[in-house]
Image (cartoon, rainbow, N blue to C red):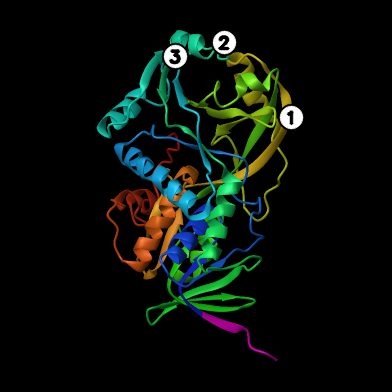
Amino acid sequence: MTEPATTDCDVVVVGLGALGSAAAWASARRGATVVGLEQFALGHERGASQDHSRIIRLSYHTPGYVALAKQAYPAWDLLAADTGEIVVERTGGLDLFPADAAIDVADYTASMDAEGVPYEVLSGAEVRNRWPLWSGLADDVTALFQAETGFVAASRAVAALQQGAMAHGADLRDNTPVVDLRVEDGSVTVTTAAGTIRAAHAVVATDAWTNAVLAPLGRQLPLTVLREQVTWFEVDDADRFDADRFPVWIWMDEPSWYGFPAMDGAIKAAEDCGGIPVDPDTRTFDPDPANEARLDHFLHDQLGGVGGIRSSKTCLYTLTPDRDFVLDRVPEAPEVLVALGAAHSFKFAAWFGLTLAQLTLDGTVDADLSPFRIDRPALTDPDHQPAWLV
């Protein structure tokens, strides 16, 4: 009987969603030999990286995230220059804070001020005047408009990262689940049913399946996996909702809602962190009618021209207790890096890839990654209370 083959490489990437595909692209682009492993088909819809769009924005609750967002845009530009795929569309964006909002508008203005990001402060009446579709918006809403906000074309972006990685020589293997990951004598050995990969470095970017992959290393993270969904609504006139007339928006309260301009004659909207905890291997893909009803009520309260529900689609949120990223080496096995986006990282995916390539190939990066340490209190203190609003 033939023994499964062993492949030697510089970097093995486990998980080929947005972050893992970006790591494979950025590492291969720098000349590293890369093997990427995906347990499902490339482009699958079981995780968090597919669909038409993900918000990209400079408005954030801390100066650190604003600074990183400023690096995210040129990282996507680099992918475009490398592959010819332009995946970012700027629409402008509205952050809408109702009176007594659960999210403090001062955190956003102070963070953008600290990083020199321009924005406009608008009242509810000014928003209605400028974008009449917001016909139900109250006068006491405070809105921040930032012109660089837009969206990343999610499925096209992941495909571009994968194509870019393969163009630079990366070996991407789908339908190849990892059954073991070990570090011995300073190198990583990853075992699959199809063979073994031996590498100097490993990047674990498996989102909801992170703890399953890290289990052989004795490291587990306090993650919560939610089944989320996005819903498409028919509109009376798609031209009125196009990207030139209807910017990306986020409702900065609890619950928090967000939405996009029209695509294919419908607008997409969703509730942030509105789902239920699930096991990623056994969760259903059926939409939640209660979630749809909450969102339907909000949109019909606030927006004119919105019709009925066209369809809904589920995805996964994998959340850390503080909703900060994980981007760090495993202390017990520094050859292994963990990349986890805490359900708001798609906009940063190309930056994640470049940063992971630097960490694996150079050993250091210029960015301050201390907020994303794997051993920070939020990930080690069992009494840390979850806080997911950002």
Label 2, secondary structure: give it.
loop
Q: Is residue 354 above or below residue 170?
A: above
Location of residue 105 by image quarter: top left
Return the mark for residue 135: 2
Find out whether the residues at labels 3 and 1 contact each other: C-beta distance under 8 Å.
Answer: no
Q: Hey, what amino acid is under mark 2?
A: Ser
Residue 182 vs 149, above or below: the answer is below
Q: Secondary structure at mark 1?
A: strand
Kind of element beneath mark 3: loop
The answer to whether residue 245 is left or right of residue 29 is: right
Q: Sequence order check: which comes first, mark 2 or mark 3?
A: 2
Which numbered disc covers residue 141? Answer: 3
Q: Is residue 349 visible?
A: yes
Locate the C terminus by quadrant: top left
Which of the 4 image quadrants contains residue 266? top right
Q: Is residue 140 above or below residue 344?
A: above
Q: Nearer the viewer, residue 133 or 372?
A: 133
- Dot 2 or dot 1, earlier in sequence: 2
Q: Who's the residue at 37% across and 17% down the image?
A: 121
**Residue interval drawn in magenta:** 1-7
Q: What's the mark number on residue 310?
A: 1
Q: In the rendered view of the protein, which quadrant contains the N terminus? A: bottom right
Q: Is residue 320 visible?
A: no
Callout 1, which amino acid?
Arg
Alpha-carbon span between mark 3 and mark 1: 29 Å
Q: Residue at x 62, y 18 (%)?
A: 240
Task: Choose between 190 and 53: the one closer to the eye.
Answer: 53
* Residue 338 location (% of width, % of height): 43, 60
Marks 2 and 3, how far apart in space? 13 Å
The residue closer to the viewer here, 276 or 187, is 187
Q: Earlier in the sequence, mark 3 or mark 1?
A: 3
Where 339 sits versus 258, above or below? below
